[in-house]
Image (cartoon, rainbow, N blue to C red):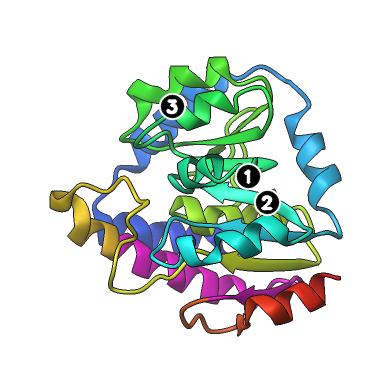
Amino acid sequence: MTIRGWQGQYSKILGEFGYSKKRDAESARLLDSIIVPNGAKEMIAGMVRGAAVLVIGAGPSLSAAMPAIRDLDAVKIAAGSSVRALVQNGIMPEIIVTDLDGDLGPLEGLAKESVIVVHAHGDNMGRLALAKRFKRCVGTSQSGAHGGIENYGGFTDGDRAVFLAHHYGAARIALLGMDFGSRIGRHSDTRRSERPTKLKKLKKGRQLLEWLATITKSELYTTSGQIAGFERITYRKLAGILE
């Protein structure tokens, strides 16, 4: 079930970024034809419901957050290009949220270990066939549910991961390496020419999280940046809460 109020948010995204709803829907139908039922949704539900969840992004604070990510006892959801840094530090996320942009090598290395949530949108149809390689895979769309494709809400990999955790009933959601500021982290795969658009997307992602904060029952925390509705918290205090 799509989160109530999402269609209004999606309409704003289409208007602000000039995306095609038709192409988004076409991409979702293509992904639906690729992914076969594999029990991944049930696995996510079993891991996340009532649990503490870390949503990990590739922002500037990711390197500083790495020791905490390694030590904290919680379900780890990696967003986008944070996967490479996590793997390099010996951290294997239980769930990965991606639109298949950037370096896919680390992602393919976890194809049999993690649940991979692949997002379909109008600009990534040429990469969706990669979903065939993932043992446990869930497909998502921002335009609506199509067959087995889900629409949990969210726009960028990072905020979509938070919407996913909300959907499956996480008790606590903490953001690490998700800064939503004016800088792009060195772990991001963003090209220099794409940075203005990336910053605009991050701003929209933060706005969506602030909207989600007004309706979710999950406790929300962030370890960097300011997000309305999220308590800014130190790594040490977060560890105490998770205990």
Name the amino acid type tagged 3: Gly
Is disc 2 placed on a helix, strand or loop? strand
Residue drawn at point x = 43 percent, y = 27 percent: 105
Q: Which residue is mark 2?
A: 76
Is disc 3 placed on a helix, strand or loop? helix
Please identify the quarter of the rendering in which residue 155 is found.
Answer: bottom left
In the visual, does 227 lie left or right of 17?
right
**x and y percent of residue 68 in the render?**
64, 64
Q: Which residues are magenta?
A: 200-223
Residue 206 belongs to magenta span: yes
Task: Rate crowding at label 1 as few (under 14), some (14 to 19) or many (20 or more) other CA atoms within 10 Å.
Answer: some
In the image, residue 42 above or below residue 78: above
- Determine if residue 62 is in view: yes
**N-terminal-most mark, 3 or 2:** 2
Q: Which residue is mark 1?
A: 91
**x and y percent of residue 107 in the render?**
51, 31
Q: Which residue is mark 3?
A: 105
**N-terminal-most mark, 1 or 2:** 2
In the visual, does 135 lie left or right of 210?
right
